[in-house]
Image (cartoon, rainbow, N blue to C red):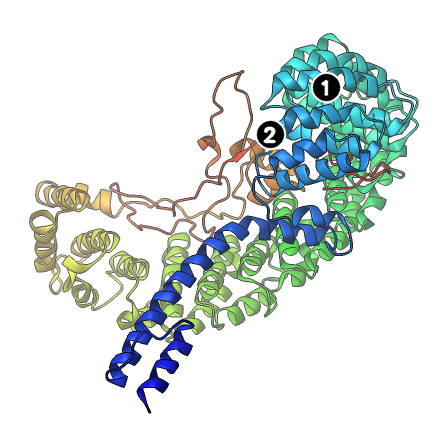
Amino acid sequence: TSPSSDRSLCGDVLGRRPLFGCGCLKTRLAAAASACRQNTVKHLEACSQLHTTMSAARAGRALGRAMGDAKGGGDGRFFSTTKKGETGELRAELQSASKDKKIDAVKKVIANMTVGKDVSMLFPDVLNCIQTSNIELKKLVYLYLMNYAKSNPDLALLAVNTFVKDAADPNPLVRALAIRTMGCIRVERITEYLCEPLEKCLDDTDPYVRKTAAVCVAKLHDIAPDLVADRGFVEKVRDLVSDPNPTVVANAVATLTEISESRDDGDALGMSNARLQKLLAALNECTEWGQVSILDALAKYVPSEAKDAERIIERVAPRLQHANAAVVLGAVKVILEYMHATLDPESDLSKGYRKKLAPPLVTLVNTAEPEMCYVALRNIALIVQRDKRVLEAEIRVFFCKYNDPLYVKLEKLEIMIRIVSEKNVDQVLLEFKEYAQEVDIDFVRRAIKAIGRCAIKLERAAQRCVNVLLELIKTRVNYVVQAGVVVVKDIFRKYPNKYEAIIGALCENLDNLDEPEAKEAMIWIIGEYADAIENADELLAQFLENFSEEEHLVKCQIVTSTVKLFLKQPTVGQAQDMVQKVLGLATECADDPDLRDRGFVYWRLLSENPEAAKAIVLGPKPPIEDDTAKLDPQTLDALLAQLGTLSSVYHKPAEAFVVADTAGPGEAVSEEPNDDFDDFDDGPAADAGGGGGDDDVFGGLSGEPTTAAPAAGGGDLLDLLDMGGLGDAPPLSGS
């Protein structure tokens, strides 16, 4: 190739004039490549800047596509802008005389606010648009005010006159919008202006306005409870319970329930026979979320006579067939509460109610969505703890499916253990045995622990449980054997000197033990039955070889079991030499103070008073108890009263994970969770009595640590019955 063609080649590659006129082709190509790399770096930097500029706009366009096609002229076009410094243009459009331009400008402001941009500097300009008869523009301005009024309280006061004026507007939509917006603006300086229009709206002729005003009372009570009491708003809301409109009744009940919870007033509804009949009548006519509010109120009202309870249950029972799971759980809550508070749980009437409760609960479990199934299972776990006879005949519903997520399978295991009885234990054990042969190791271990819990719960079925465990141990699958050893130790604790025949099968699998819990359990068994095992000293010697490398709980158990061996058979085999060796290792070579102190105490007991050592080390042990009823009665009652809420999913009272905003003005709100409720239902339930295994005076049963639920900040009253959007119709949708 000629030099001229080389220069042309380089010029074409770089997109500019040739850099080289002569020289080696290899040198020229290397220089061209270097120049290309420099251009590439510059290009990448430019792309990075462009990506940063467009990242926020991309999120806005995505939200805009959800709201409408930008090309089709929908509201989505307000999210598709990528311009910078448009505040001035928005301000000019907001001040325009054209109504259409004002509406578009406010929509752009709302779009920017939605994607996270700070548009608070436009507060005065948006506020000037509030004086309009256009309902769409008014809704947009009110939406902006609700978001930024707290940061601009002085300017928000300028809108009070408009609020008061709109609260008397002939259009009921405008009146309801004004009173709702004033309730959502959580500024104390506005509350005094809210009282008079709120009082008028509570007596409004339109039911949509009355229902909105009822919820506004709860919001006002959250800001200024004394003001609500002084103006008599609670009594006015109580009067709304007798309103002819069922939606107004539902909103009034929700408001009174919220107020009663905030001030610990159990009779905020002021329930009378007339109001009770009005609630039951509204139950058939209001929306599903209104039904939930009414059912919650009925659950808190306990009738004094059994006949009244029967009549209420008969009116509530049709709600068990509702399509909404929240309504179903609300009806279940009412029936359960009345059965155990007013009726005789052992009566034939209660048996009939139990049969009615089973089908809707089974339907909730069989839902296709695993998340919904899990929530239903958590609620059912509380129900069967109160009365397992509700679902005792439906235990097959809780058998795990192959495609169930692990969290659903574990919850089903818990429920099966709670409702298992001598009638159905055989089919449950057969199911657990199949689970123990699956590939999911965590699930296999929980299934094996479930077999042990059945043995502890049902004494007459313990032998069948032990036989199943023995079959699993003989499979010699490593993790199955180790889980089985831990479970067998608990069974030995529950039924001492009863199932020693399986000790031989356990001793054959010593080489398969590599987990600390399994080693600790096996060492405990050897020490506890040292007089029944011929070569107990040789078996303990195997663990003693690697004493310094073992975990803390294994070391402690080796020391205790060796002392037990010496006390039971002091002259047999290597017992005396072993106890001297292990106590020497514990007192001279160990850095762990717990292990060292344990060794010193044992040494002094054996040297000073062997009989006292026998009484202490070989004394009676704490019994293993059935742990299926893990919640105390008071906590269980509190959780059942909150059935269908987050409390029934977490198995913790609301105070444990909801932080109320009790700080005064200018004070910081503590976000620390309440540690008093940390351990209601956490951690594997299968660890009943199993743990460290140190059953002498130096240790006890150790459980696994629990994890506190994350704290969640409290917020405004959720208006489940009044979540209207920007449409012209007064919507009533759930959350």
Q: 246 above or below 607?
A: above
Amino acid type of disc 2?
Answer: Ser
Q: Which residue is mark 2?
A: 120
- Residue 367 is situated, as x and y percent measured from the top left of the image, at 70, 59
Looking at this view, is 64 or 46 the one in front?
A: 46
Amino acid type of disc 1?
Answer: Ala
Secondary structure under tag 2 reads helix
Residue 733 shown left or right of residue 664 in the figure: right
- Mark 1 vs 2, N-terminal side: 2
Residue 81 shown left or right of residue 180 in the figure: left
Q: 96 above or below 526?
A: above
Looking at this view, is 178 or 336 the one in front?
A: 178
The structure residue drawn at horizontal position 20% and vertical position 46%, both measured from the top left corner, is: 614
Q: 257 above or below 41?
A: above
- Residue 687 is situated, as x and y percent measured from the top left of the image, at 42, 51
Residue 647 shown left or right of residue 453 in the figure: right
Of the numbered discs in the image, which one, if any, rests on residue 159? Answer: 1
Q: Quadrant of residue 91?
A: top right
The structure residue drawn at horizontal position 80% and vertical position 51%, both measured from the top left corner, is: 323
